[in-house]
Image: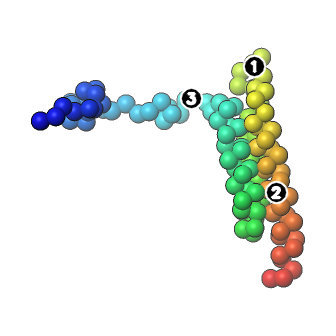
Amino acid sequence: MTTSTIPPHENPHNLHETEAPTPPVRWNRHTPISSSEYSDMSMMFGALSILTFWMFGLGILLGAAALGAGLSARRPDTAGHNSGDGHGAIGILTGTAGITFGIVFLTAAVPHL
């Protein structure tokens, strides 16, 4: 018989009935979202807003989410700490582009409906 590659503390068969598995760290609701996570969300929403500008308002909504997350990414995490990575600005630019493309598409498509 081969040995298990699962560490003994992570093996579900080794848990006693009184022990509960500990949740991952991210499930802790008291941990604030950092500016790097906001900048990642901003870039993701901005890219999706550009890709979905033709979906009758979805690109505009995703662009607004990108702007909000980008502005939150530009805010410092702690007092005296400047988050100058620039990824929040990229999210703001892509969100603005998605909103612009969505508005142009809606003004061109609505008269033909």
Residue 7 image point, x, y percent? 28, 28
Q: Is residue 61 above or below residue 87?
A: below
Name above or below for residue 101 compared with residue 20: below
Nearest the camera: 47 or 62? 47
Of badges 3 and 2, the one in the foreground is 2
Badge 1 is on which residue?
Answer: 81
- What is the x, y in percent for residue 81? 75, 19
Within 10 Å of the Cα at label 3, are there few (<14), some (14-19), or many (20+) other Cα atoms?
few
CA–CA distance in space, label 3 to label 2: 31 Å
Which residue: 16% across, 34% down? 2
Q: Residue at the location (83% across, 53% down)?
A: 97
Q: Which of the two residues, 19 or 44, is positioned nearer the viewer here?
A: 44
Identify the residue under disc 2: 99
Residue extending furthest toward the top: 80
In the rendered view of the protein, which quadrant contains the N terminus?
top left
- Tell me residue 101's x, y (percent): 83, 61
